[in-house]
Image: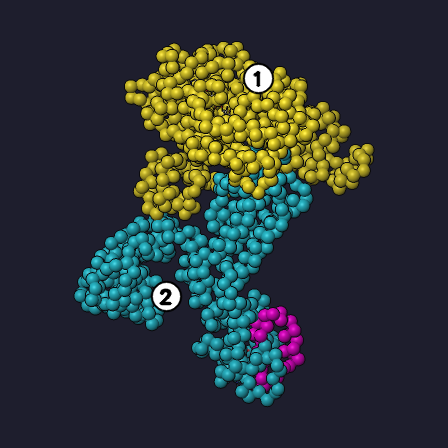
Chain colours: A cyan, B yellow
Amino acid sequence: MKYYEYDTDDMIAALATPWGESALAVIRTSGDGCIEALSPCFRGKDNLSGSDGYSLHFGRIIDPGTGNTVDQVVAGVYRKPKSYTGQDMVEIFCHGSMPGITGILDALRNTGFRDAAPGEFTLRAFLNGKMDLTGAEAVNEIIRAKSPQAMGLALERLSGSVFNSINSIKALVSGILAEIELQLDYAEDEADPEAVLSTGKIETAISGLKELASTYRIGKVIQEGVRAVLTGRTNAGKSSLFNLLNRAERAIVSEYHGTTRDYIESLLVISGIPVKLYDTAGIRVSDHPVEAEGIKKSGEIIEASDIIIYLVDGCDGLTAEDRKRIDLFDRKKLIKVWNKSDISTKEIPEDYIAVSSLTGSGLDDLEKEIVSRAGAENIMLDDRAVIDSQRQKTLIDSALLSLENSLSAIRGSMPLDVVAVDIKEALDSLGEITGEITTADILDLMFSRFCVGK
Amino acid sequence: MDFDAIVIGGGHAGIEAGLALARLSYRTLFITQNVDTIGKLSCNPAVGGLSKGNIVREVDALGGEMANLIDSTMIQFRMLNKSRGPAVQAPRAQADKFAYNQLAKWTLERQDNLQLFQDTVTDFILNSRGNKIEGVITERGRRFTANAVVLTTGTFLEGMIFIGDYTSVSGRIGEPAALGLGVNLRKMGFSVGRLKTGTPARVRKGSLDFSKMERQDGDGEIIPFSFSRDNVERPQLPCHITYTNEKTHQVIRDNIGRSPLFGGKISGKGPRYCPSIEDKVVRFPDKLRHQVFVEPEGLESEEMYLNGISSSLPEDVQEAFLKTLPGLEKVEVIRPGYAVEYDFIDPRQLKPYLMTKKIEGLFVAGQTNGTSGYEEAACQGLMAGINASLYLAGRGPFVLGRTEAYTGVLIDDLVTLGTEEPYRMFTSRAEHRLSLRHDTADRRLMPKSKEIGLLRNEAWEKFQEKLSRTDEVRELLRQRRVTESEIKTVDGALYTVLKKHIGKTYEQTIKDPDVTIETFRDFDDVIDRTSKEWLSLVELDIKYEGYIDRQERQVKRFEKMEKMKIPENFNYDTVDGISTESRQKFKAVMPATIGQATRISGVRNSDIAVLMIYLGRKK
Ligand SMILES: Cc1cc2nc3c(=O)[nH]c(=O)nc-3n(C[C@H](O)[C@H](O)[C@H](O)COP(=O)(O)OP(=O)(O)OC[C@H]3O[C@@H](n4cnc5c(N)ncnc54)[C@H](O)[C@@H]3O)c2cc1C
Ligand SMILES: Nc1nc2c(ncn2[C@@H]2O[C@H](COP(=O)(O)OP(=O)(O)OP(=O)(O)O)[C@@H](O)[C@H]2O)c(=O)[nH]1
Ligand SMILES: [Mg+2]
C-alpha cells in the first residue's frame, strides 16, 4: 500500500463489518465536512449537522436522488479531533442485509463520498497522531481478526500492554547501556565506582524478552487458528464428525471404506478460537494410487497439525492397527475419540471421549477438549501481553540474540566497547517496536544516575 | 579591504582559525583582548582525554597546531581506558599551562601572513543590505575591513563571574569581559543565550601534605599526539588523589543558601557532566565521598589545580570545606574557584561549515557555539578557518561526516540539535565510534587536509611511509600461515594457544583474543622492523573488523533516512498530524534530511513517519 497516493482529508466511506448477511452492519465515514454532507440523507428527530460529538441519532437514510428510504439506522456522530481518525466522522449502524448496505453506500456515493481504500481509516488515524505504528498494526489485525478472542488480543495491544512490557525491558537495557557508556566516556579513575556492569541485569532483560517471545505461539494461534486434523481407520466416522463440528454437510459420508480420498478443510470458531479443521482419508493399506496418495497427504497434514483427533470405530473397538498408530502420535497433541458410542457395545476406556457423530452426543466434551488443547484457556484467563505480529517476534528474537551475545562477550572478557555494540543492537531492535532511544536519552540516564566528572 | 580575514579571540578556537587562514596564504588580522593570554588554559591544565584526545589527533591530521603545543609542553602523559577496549582508548596529558600559553603566542607571532593586534571587537561592519560581513569595529574605535570574519569569543562575551556574593564583569578571573558585541549580535537578529561553567580553586603546593593522598604517575611510555613526531621527551610530574568526606559535605550543605547557583543569581545552564561540588553534594546525597585530583599547573609554578571540586561558593566557605580534605588541612588558596556566565550563539543558526545563515562571511567557532573544552574549541576553530579560506577562494565548503571524525559528529550535533548545556564530546555521541580510533585520525583525514593544502609535506611523507608499511604488514599477515616449526620456540601457555591455529593465516590467528600481533615479531623480519604503534594499528584493524561491520550495519538502518532530503524552505505548517512540540522543533532546526530530523531530541517517531509520508507524497 502506498500511503502517499491518498488525499488525507476528503470524505470517504466503507462498510466496516464483513460483507454478508448479519444482524447488524456498520458503515463508517470520515473526512472534512462529512457530518454536514450526510445531513441531507438523514431523516430523524435530530438534524445531524448541528449535533454534538459523541451523540447517537435514530432515523432513516434517504437516497438523495430518488427520495426513497433505504434503511432504518442509528447514526453515531464524532467531531474532530475526538474520533478514531481524528477527523469528523459518522458511523451508521444499519441492518445487515445486502440490499440495505449497498443502498446506503450508493446514497453516500451520490452525496460526494468516495469508497475508502483498505486501511485508509487507520492511515488517517495514524497521520493525525491518533496512534503509533504498534497501534496501527494492531488495528490492521483487528480488521483481519477471525474471531472475537483475536479481536480482544488485538485491542489489548492497542491499549498498550505489549508496548508497556517492551518499554520496561527497554528501560532496563538503556540503563545497562548507560552504565557501559559511562565507563567508556570517563577514565578508569573518574567513573562512578557504583556504575559497574552487572550481568544480572542483562539476564533479567533476557528472561523478560523470552517470556514475551513465548507468547507469540499463543498469539499466532489466536490470530491464524489452530490446525486440527481428524484421523483414524477407514469408516471410523471421520467425515461424519467433520460435518457435525461444522454443523453442515461438507464431506461425503458413506458406509463404504475409503470414501474420503482427498482431504477437506474448513475454518470454524469454537468458543471464540478459530480452528482449521481437516478431514482426511482413512488409514489402510491401499493399492489404489489415488487413495494411496490421499493417505500420504494425510500424513503430511497430521505432521503440521497442532491437534490430532484420532477416531476409533466404536463398533469394532480398539484394533491392533489403532494401537500401533496411536503410539506414533505426540501425546500432547492427541485427542482420542470413541465414535459411534450410540451403537458401541464395547466398554469405553477412560481416556477416550465418547462421541456419536450420528446423534451429536459427546460433542460438547470434544469441543471443550479442543479449546483446552489450543492453549487458549490460559490466554483467556490471564492478561499477559501477547505478541501476535511476525514483525514484533522477529525484532524480539534479534534483541534476545544480541543480549545473549553480549553476555558471552562479557564472559569471554571481550572489551567493553565491543559489548556496547551488542547492547546497542538489542536496544535498536526494541526501539523499532516502540520507538527509538536516542543518544541524548542515554546521556540523560548517565548523568541522572551517576555522579561523574572531575 | 585591509585584510582577507579577521579572527576575533585568542583562545583555542582562534589560534587554529588564525593559523589555518595564514598558512593557506590569506592575510589575516588576529585581534584579541590581551595578547599575553593567547592559548591560556582557562580551567584544567590538561589536554586530551576520552574522545577529546581523538579530537586533538584529528586536529593534527588536518594540519592544526594543538597536538604540537601539548607534545611540547606536557608534564604527564597517560593513555586512558586501556582496560575498556582499544577503540575507546585515548591519550591525555597534563600541560605546563604557562609554557603552553607562551608557545601558543610565540607560534602565532612567528606565522607569516598573520598580524597580531591587541584590542576588543565591539561591533561588525556589514554591507548596505546587512547580510554580508565587511569588517569589525573595536573598543578603541579602530575599523578594519575584511571579507571573512571568524568569531571565537569563548567565555568572554558579556561574561560575568560569580564567587558567592561577589560578581564581576569578566571572562576569566582578573580579565575583563568583552562588552558590546553580545548586544550587537542580538541587534543583528541572532538568537543568543546564556551558559555557565565553573572552575575550582588553585592552591599552593607547599601548603599541601601529599603523604595523605594517593599518588598517580603517568605512563612510562609516551605516545605523541602529533603524527609528525616519533617521541616526546619531557619531564613527568605526578598527580595526587584525595577525597571529600561527610565533613566537607556538611560545610557545603550548611552554606548552600550562599551559592549564586542555588540562590538563583545565575540563570545560565551549567554542564551536567562536570558539576560543581555543591551540585554533586545536592544531587547525589547518598554519595559519601567525591574524588579530587590534585594536579600541577606547571614545572616552574607552585600552583596546584584541584580537579573535581569546582565551586562558586563564597571564598570563606571554599576555604572551610577545602580544609576538611585529607592533605589540605593547611591549604593556602592562591585563586578561588568561580563560576562564569557568558553569551553563546544558538549554533542552529550556522551552516554545517560554521558560517552563519544570516550573515555571509561570518564564521563562528568554539565556546561561542555552546561547546566547552579546549579540544572542542580547537577543532571548530580549524574547521571555521579552513572554511573561511574556501569561502574567500570561492570554493565549496569542507564538511566532515559523522563517519569520518569526532569533529564531524560535533559540528553536526551543534548545527542540528543545538545545545542546552555546554556541549562536550563523548564517545557515545559517535555512532561510528569503533571507526574513529585516535590512531586512525591520519588515515581518515590527512588526504583531505593535503587536498586543502594545509598539511605540511613532512607529515604527508611520514603518513605515506606508514601507509605502505602497514599495508605491507597486513598483506604479509594475510599470506603467512602459522607452522609447527616456527612456534616451537614459543613458551608454555602461548604455545598451546598458537597450536590451535596451525595452518591458519596470521591474520585469522590474530582474531583470537588471546593472541597479539607482537607474537609474530620473532617470526618475520618486516614485522619485527615495524614500530609497536604501527603494529597495534594493524592489529586493531583486524580484531575490530567484524564489529565494525556490525556497527556499520546498525548505522545503515538509519542511513536511508539520511538520503531523504527535506526541501530547504519546507513549510511544516502544511503538514497535518505532526504534534505541536515536534513542529516547533522542526521549525527551529530546519533539518536538511529526515536523518537529521530524527536526531532532534524529543521528536516523536510517529511525527517522523508522518513527515516521511508527506514528503513521499509530494514527489
Ligand atoms: C571558569 C571557567 C571554567 C571552565 N570550565 C571548563 C570545564 O569544566 N571543562 C571544560 O572542558 N572547559 C572548561 N572551560 C572552558 C575552556 O576554557 C574553554 O572551553 C576553551 O578555552 C574555549 O576556547 P575558545 O577558544 O572558544 O575560547 P577562550 O579560550 O575562552 O578564548 C576566548 C578568547 O577570545 C578573546 N576575546 C573574547 N571576546 C573578544 C572580543 N570581542 N575581542 C577580542 N578578543 C576577544 C578573549 O580575551 C580570549 O582570549 C572553562 C573556562 C572557564 C573560564
Ligand atoms: N451409528 C453410527 N454410525 C455412524 C457414526 N459415525 C459414522 N457412522 C456411519 O459410519 C459410516 C462411515 O462414516 P464416514 O463418516 O463416511 O466414515 P469415514 O471415517 O469418513 O470413512 P472413510 O472416509 O472411508 O475413511 C457411515 O455409514 C456413517 O453413517 C456414529 O456415531 N454412529
Ligand atoms: Mg470419510
**Tag 2, which chain?**
A
Q: Label 2: state its secondary structure.
A: loop
Residue carrying label 1: B98
In the foreground, B348 or B511: B348
* Residue B131 x/y as whole percent: 32, 23
B489 w.r.t. B169: above or below: below
Can you tell which quarter of the image residue A293 is in?
bottom right
Q: Relative to A320, does residue B475 appear above or below in the rendering?
A: above
Whether residues under marks 1 and 2 lie with C-beta atoms below 8 angstroms apart, the answer is: no
* Residue B529 screen position, x and y as percent: 72, 24
Locate the C terminus of chain B by quadrant: top left
Q: How far apart are labels 1 and 2 at the CA level?
A: 83 Å
Which of the two residues, B275 or B234, is positioned nearer the viewer here?
A: B275
**Quarter assignment of residue B45:** top right
Q: Amino acid at mark 1?
A: Phe
Q: Which residues are magenta?
A: A308-335
Numbered disc 1: what chain? Answer: B
Relative to B547, A68 lies left or right: left
> What residue type is disc 2 on?
Pro
10 Å neighbourhood of mark 2: few (<14), some, or many (≥20)?
few
Describe residue B526's horizontal placement relative to residue B590 as left or right. right
Residue matched to label 2: A18
